[in-house]
Amino acid sequence: MSEKNKLMVEILSTVVLPKLKGLSEKNAKKIMAVSEKSLGQIAKKYHHLLNDQAEKEKEQKAKDLKKDKKVAEKLAKKNDKLARRDSVQKKLDLLLNSKTTVAKKTTPSSEN
């Protein structure tokens, strides 16, 4: 039995055994054996459940991180797409503005 389990058995037995007064020595020994075994099982189960709970919390954190990462990647893709669209629009605006300035420059010179 591990140290954690032994400590828990001792603590539980100090709480449970004093409530079982009035037994003969033979019956008290039987109760001690049964209670120690039962309390040992309780302690093992308790620590096992604590470990399981910690593992589930780790798994949940990993899932949350993965989900957050996906959301961040999605947002980055969206921002990249918007940036490319804006870039294309700026190029078009530059092209359109440069054509109008070229057209304005050619019109007055053709009149002379």
Image (cartoon, grey):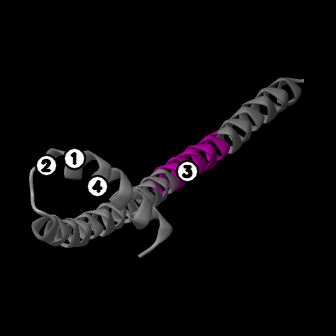
Q: Which mark is residue 30?
A: none
Q: Sequence order check: which comes first, mark 2 or mark 4? A: 4
Whether residues under marks 4 and 3 lie with C-beta atoms below 8 angstroms apart, the answer is no
Residue 99: x and y in percent read 73, 38
Disc 1 or disc 3, which is closer to the eye?
1
> As displayed, is residue 47 above or below residue 13?
below
* Kind of residue at disc 1: Pro
Up the image or down, 65 lies above or below 95; here it is below
Question: For the C terminus, which image quadrant?
Answer: top right
Q: Quadrant of residue 40?
A: bottom left
Three-letter code for the amino acid on which mark 2 is drawn:
Lys
Total marks placed: 4
Query: Is 13 a magenta residue?
Result: no
Give the residue number, with chain letter if any, for mark 2.
21
The residue that label 4 is drawn on is: 13
- Horizontally, residue 44 falls left or right of residue 22, namely right
Q: Nearer the viewer, mark 4 or mark 3?
A: 4
Q: Position of residue 24 (x, y in %)?
A: 10, 62
Three-letter code for the amino acid on which mark 4 is drawn: Ser
Q: Which residue is mark 3?
A: 81
Name which residue lies at 14% across and 72% down: 30
- Which residue lies under the disc numbered 1? 18
Measure the C-alpha gap from mark 1 to mark 2.
6 Å
- Residue 72 shown in magenta: yes
Q: Residues within 10 Å of mark 1 (few under 14, many from 20)?
A: few
Give the residue at x 51% y 47%.
75
The amino acid on which the numbered mark 3 sits, given as a three-letter code, is Lys
Q: Please tell me whether mark 3 sits on a helix, a strand or a loop.
A: helix
Pointer 2 local density, CA inside 10 Å: few below 14, some 14–19, many at least 20: few
Distance from Cα at disc 2 to Cα at disc 4 = 13 Å
Which region is colored magenta?
70-89
